[in-house]
């Protein structure tokens, strides 16, 4: 079965798609809509997902995140998988389609958040940003802002992006922290000059926060 699926992935490889993806740090040339269609045909198949992940191929790893059973992984398996998911798209899909559906998500978020590996730490920050929006609960928002203020400016790109996302979500979703979030963004100027397509919102936190708050207030 694995050989058949890998052969199918090979037929979906497109040089132009690979070229576009390479600009974002992703080393595969498979159209994601076609990949999702392949996953839909395969349905849930956890054993095959494990085999696909073990190939080390980026497109195969992406497919694995779509057909696995997230709750079947234990904590250590998920930690190991994260550390073998260096591609930005694999990391993104792994967090959204696997880790967030796992009963171990909060334990892993807390562990990854302080990991010395910046890629692993970026996963912790991404999950924290998600909690800021959906279930802030016992999160210490002022402490998060302290950490962002102290570390975001000099953080590696992927970690910096995740911290900036957390900063924006705090400003957007928590009015009591909004002024400080805006002030931090304005002072650090992280992603201020990031190229943004027409009609899209800049990832620069002050612009992002104000745009989303204006949208909320407009109803």
Image (cartoon, helix red, strand yellow):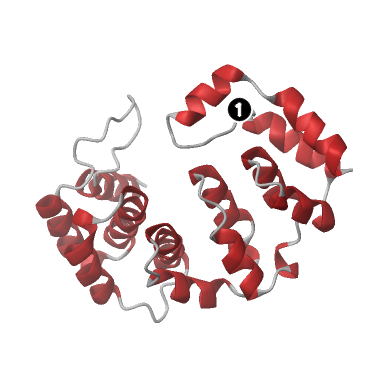
Residue farthest along the right direction in this orientation: 1
Whole-percent x and y of residue 214?
Answer: 27, 46
* Residue at 70% across, 42% down: 60
Q: Judge whether residue 114 can be spotted in this image.
A: yes
* Residue at 45% across, 76% down: 110
Whole-percent x and y of residue 64?
Answer: 71, 49
Identify the residue position indicated by label 1 in the image.
29
> Viewed as shown, does residue 11 lie left or right of 57?
right
Whole-percent x and y of residue 125?
Answer: 39, 63
> Viewed as shown, does residue 11 lie left or right of 205?
right
Tell me the SS state at disc 1.
loop
In the rendered image, which quarter is residue 128 located in? bottom left
* Residue at 71% across, 52% down: 54
| Relative to 139, residue 32 above or below | above
Whole-percent x and y of residue 218?
Answer: 32, 45
In the rendered image, which quarter is residue 9 located in? top right
Residue farthest along the bottom direction in this orientation: 138
């Amino acid at each position: 079965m694995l050989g058949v699926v890998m052969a199918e992935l090979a037929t979906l490889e497109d040089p132009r798609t690979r070229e576009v993806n390479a600009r974002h740090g992703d080393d595969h040339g498979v159209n994601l809509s076609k990949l999702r269609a392949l996953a839909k045909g395969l349905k849930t198949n956890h054993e095959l997902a494990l085999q696909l992940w073990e190939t080390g191929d980026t497109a195969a790893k992406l497919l694995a995140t779509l057909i696995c059973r997230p709750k079947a992984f234990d904590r250590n398996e998920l930690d190991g998988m994260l550390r073998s998911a260096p591609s930005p798209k694999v990391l993104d899909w792994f967090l959204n389609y696997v880790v967030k559906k796992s009963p171990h998500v909060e334990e892993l978020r807390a562990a990854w958040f302080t990991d010395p590996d910046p890629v692993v730490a970026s996963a912790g920050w991404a999950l924290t940003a998600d909690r800021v929006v959906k279930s802030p609960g016992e999160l210490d928002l002022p402490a998060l802002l302290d950490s962002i203020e102290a570390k975001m400016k000099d953080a590696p790109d992927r970690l910096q992006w995740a911290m900036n996302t957390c900063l924006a979500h705090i400003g957007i979703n928590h009015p009591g922290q909004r002024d400080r979030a805006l002030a931090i963004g304005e002072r650090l100027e992280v992603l201020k000059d990031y190229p943004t397509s027409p009609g899209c919102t800049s990832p620069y936190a002050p612009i992002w926060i104000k745009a989303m708050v204006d949208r909320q207030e407009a109803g």
